[in-house]
């Protein structure tokens, strides 16, 4: 069941087929790029997406393998280049995530994520603590986040400004990816913090990555529809969080608005595309009824093809640890009874979780 649901990912992982970003580099713009406005670029993007889908279908149907794609003529300006240019325009009035700050990060302004156009990598290594089909995972931890989770276990890299780590260019980020692949990474795992504020650098890096490797998006999924469109044709496997079953818990514990609606919309886009996806749900104490149940019910109805990791790793950290009276509902570890209840809900809903949880 796992291999079947993650078949595209496995085929890219073993170099049977080219990763999506590799295919995107072979879909060309006939007349190059001129002075197009953002609306015109999106029209071009959507047209190229249709051409890309033809190549992708050939690869999925066994008619275009990794050696055959390398024989194709590489265009001067590609579908990937168009994505990069759109991402650059978005950074000038930033709306990668649903905060839609609208600030000119290229010009040095900072939005909710507190980043200008720079990208910080806090660490990168072969991670063996992820879901079994993913390890060893070539994990790249980015500094910054667009959430303010009061229980954040990575608050040192996501919330404490100025951000630590090394500042990387697109070329340097590509070198990190190639290094991890050569060292044995099954995938490149973009995580954090949160990768979303770094979409411009990440897309730009894919011009320079030399090795075929699945791209994995490990995210809180609070992206705009525009950001999702940029990613859908370059990400090979998705590893999203779906923490809250309502907007009020998200607002109180992660200081984010309209959470459920945004994340559900974005997950639906992934699921409708039939991309490989493992949804992570962190079970929190006292939040079975308000969060776990509605999240699992949504998955069962709207994304039944997903694998689900029902996670028991919650522990009171960061602000919860410092102000336990303020967050008394989550100021303890999960009980065994709560975890088993979450498992039982998933079983009744016929959710595939036991091979990855």
Image (spheres, helix red, strand yellow):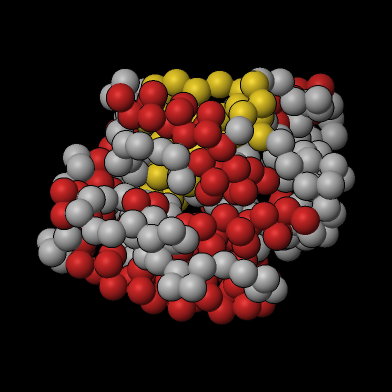
Quarter of the image for residue 305 reads: bottom left
Q: Is residue 44 above or below residue 88?
A: below
The one of 110 and 355 positioned closer to us in this rendering: 110
The one of 241 and 122 positioned closer to us in this rendering: 122
Q: Is residue 322 above or below residue 250?
A: above
Q: Is residue 46 above or below residue 125?
A: below
- Is 276 situated left or right of 285 in this image? left
The one of 300 and 106 positioned closer to us in this rendering: 106
- Is 7 situated left or right of 239 in this image? left
Residue 59: image location, x then y, percent: 21, 61
Residue 9: image location, x then y, percent: 28, 48
Would residue 120 be visible to someone looking at this image?
yes
Residue at image position (49%, 73%) is 31
The one of 31 and 331 positioned closer to us in this rendering: 31
Residue at image position (57%, 67%) is 33
Residue 219: image location, x then y, percent: 55, 46
- Is 255 situated left or right of 232 in this image? right
Residue at image position (43%, 58%) is 76
Q: Is residue 59 above or below residue 355?
A: below
Residue at image position (61%, 33%) is 169
Residue 89: image location, x then y, percent: 70, 60
């Amino acid at each position: 069941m796992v291999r079947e649901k993650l078949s595209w990912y496995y085929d890219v992982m073993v170099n049977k087929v080219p990763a999506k970003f590799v295919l995107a580099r072979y879909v060309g713009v006939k007349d190059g790029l001129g002075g197009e406005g953002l609306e015109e670029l999106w029209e071009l993007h959507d047209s190229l997406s249709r051409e890309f889908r033809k190549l992708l279908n050939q690869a999925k149907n066994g008619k275009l393998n990794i050696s055959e794609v390398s024989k194709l003529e590489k265009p001067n300006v590609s579908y990937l280049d168009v994505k990069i240019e759109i991402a650059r325009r978005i950074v000038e009035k930033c709306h990668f995530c649903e905060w839609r700050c609208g600030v000119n990060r290229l010009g040095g302004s900072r939005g909710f994520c507190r980043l200008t156009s720079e990208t910080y990598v806090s660490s990168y290594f072969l991670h063996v603590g992820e879901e079994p089909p993913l390890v060893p995972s070539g994990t790249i931890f980015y500094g910054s986040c667009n959430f303010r989770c009061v229980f954040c276990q990575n608050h040192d890299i996501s919330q404490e400004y100025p951000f630590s780590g090394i500042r990387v260019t697109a070329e340097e980020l590509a070198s990190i990816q190639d290094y991890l692949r050569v060292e044995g990474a099954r995938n490149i795992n973009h995580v954090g913090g949160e990768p979303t504020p770094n979409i411009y650098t990440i897309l730009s890096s894919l011009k320079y990555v030399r090795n075929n490797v699945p791209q994995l998006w490990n995210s809180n999924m609070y992206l705009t529809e525009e950001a999702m469109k940029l990613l859908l044709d370059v990400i090979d496997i998705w590893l999203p969080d779906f923490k809250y079953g309502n907007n009020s818990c998200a607002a109180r514990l992660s200081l984010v608005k309209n959470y459920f609606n945004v994340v559900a919309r974005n997950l639906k886009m992934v699921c409708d595309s039939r991309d490989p996806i493992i949804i992570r749900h962190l079970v929190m104490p006292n939040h079975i009824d308000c969060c776990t149940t509605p999240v699992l019910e949504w998955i069962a109805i709207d994304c039944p093809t997903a694998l689900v990791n029902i996670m028991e790793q919650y522990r009171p950290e960061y602000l919860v640890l410092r102000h336990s009276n303020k967050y008394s509902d989550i100021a303890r570890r999960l009980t065994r009874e709560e975890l088993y209840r979450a498992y039982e809900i998933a079983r009744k809903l016929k959710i595939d979780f036991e091979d990855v949880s």
